[in-house]
Image (tube, rainbow, N blue to C red):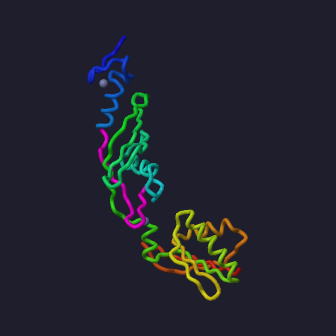
Amino acid sequence: MIKYCPTCNRSSEEARFIGEFCEFCVADKISAGMPGSAEVEKCWSCGRIRTPEGFAALDYGTLAAALRKSMRLTDCTLDVKSMDERRQSAIVCITCKQGGEPVTFDKNIHVKFLRTMCQACYRRSSGYYEALVQLRGGPRVVETMAESITKFIEARDGIITRTERTPRGYDIYIGDKELANAYFALHKNLSPLRSYKLFGVKKGKRLFRNIYSLHL
Ligand SMILES: [Zn+2]
Ligand SMILES: [Zn+2]
């Protein structure tokens, strides 16, 4: 028996039906229940946006992840089809399940970029560091090691607050001590002399900087 959609009068020969209504009207109803705008935090210093996995360069993939979170679309998928950063708008394709059936529709979203500063930029600008690696030895070998450490940290989105040349090597100031630890955990042949220096107290907890001295 042919069904007719009570909203738009399309027949079941023209469109897929989900329950009593055609898929287009079901999609319109779901879309109307969603916010037309969404807020996304953007670092004014480096231009990266906040995603559920941390700050990342703005592209269709990261914007989709940020919008999905911001719009609380836990049961739907979202893809970005186009974006106009200057106009702060994006056209997205959303797919939700309705009565076990997938319903897909496009939606224009007003994307409000909120100015913020990401932790990496904050740490870099404030000179913050949690670990200091002191490399000493011949000029070539310390240079190679300094490059290796820098690459490792930057590949993992960590920050090198600064690198200083000393008469016998390099001092590398690193924002995140977990990453400094990870480097030496990976390169087990290097066994730096480790020491710790108190640098502050936060909420009653003493904070230590890790110092790694490596003679090559
Ligand atoms: Zn309809
Ligand atoms: Zn930043």
Count of numbered labels shown in the rendering: 0
Q: Nearer the viewer, residue 192 or 93?
A: 93
- Please give the name of the residue rendered at 36% of the width and 27% of the height, measured from the top-left corner: 23
Tell me residue 112's x, y (percent): 31, 54
- Say above or below: 4 vs 26: above
Residue 103 on the magenta segment: no
- Say above or below: 106 vs 86: above
Q: Nearer the viewer, residue 116 or 212?
A: 116
Residue range highlighted in magenta: 33-50
- Please give the name of the residue rendered at 36% of the width and 38% of the height, measured from the top-left corner: 106
Q: In which image quadrant can residue 102 be found?
A: top left
- Please give the name of the residue rendered at 53% of the width and 70% of the height, measured from the top-left corner: 176
Residue 47 on the magenta segment: yes
- Please give the name of the residue rendered at 32% of the width and 43% of the height, measured from the top-left corner: 108
- Say above or below: 109 vs 117: above
Of all residues shown, which one is farthest toward the bottom?
Answer: 167
